[in-house]
Amino acid sequence: MQSNIPYRDCLIHIESFQLTRSSGWIPRFTLTRRDEVPSGRDRLDKVFPSKDEADEFALEDAMQWIDQKGSTV
């Protein structure tokens, strides 16, 4: 999955990670808008067996967050 995805007036940066080599993948995203400090979140309550699955969840989570906040991040 591409790591920088434009959505509405934001840029979603996907950066899922593993705590250790043998652990699952934690979804993480950062949102940026012009002239604003980036914001984002780690979903420590969700763990996925692959990076692709974590990235997909992070993208969906970011889009929902943007939609809920009316694109005000």
Image: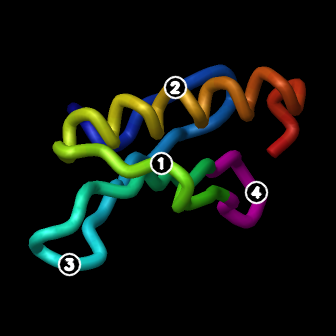
Relative horizontal placement of residue 30, taking residue 68 as reference (left or right) = left
In which quadrant of the rendered image does the N terminus lie? Answer: top left
Q: What type is the residue that disc 4 sits on?
A: Asp
Q: Which residue is mark 2?
A: 60
Q: How is the image coloured?
A: rainbow
Question: Magenta segment, which residues?
Answer: 32-39
Earlier-in-chain disc, 3 versus 4 = 3
Asked if 8 appears above or below 57 in the picture, the reply is above
For the residue pair 18 and 66, the one nearer the viewer reads as 18
Earlier-in-chain disc, 2 versus 1 = 1
Q: Is residue 71 magenta?
A: no
Q: Which residue is mark 4?
A: 35
Residue shown at the point (73%, 66%) measured from the top left: 37
Earlier-in-chain disc, 4 versus 2 = 4
Q: CA distance from mark 2 to mark 1?
A: 13 Å
Relative horizontal placement of residue 52, taking residue 41 as reference (left or right) = left
Crowding near the residue tagged with mark 3, few <14, some 14–19, many ≥20 C-alpha atoms within 10 Å:
few
* Secondary structure of residue under mark 4: loop
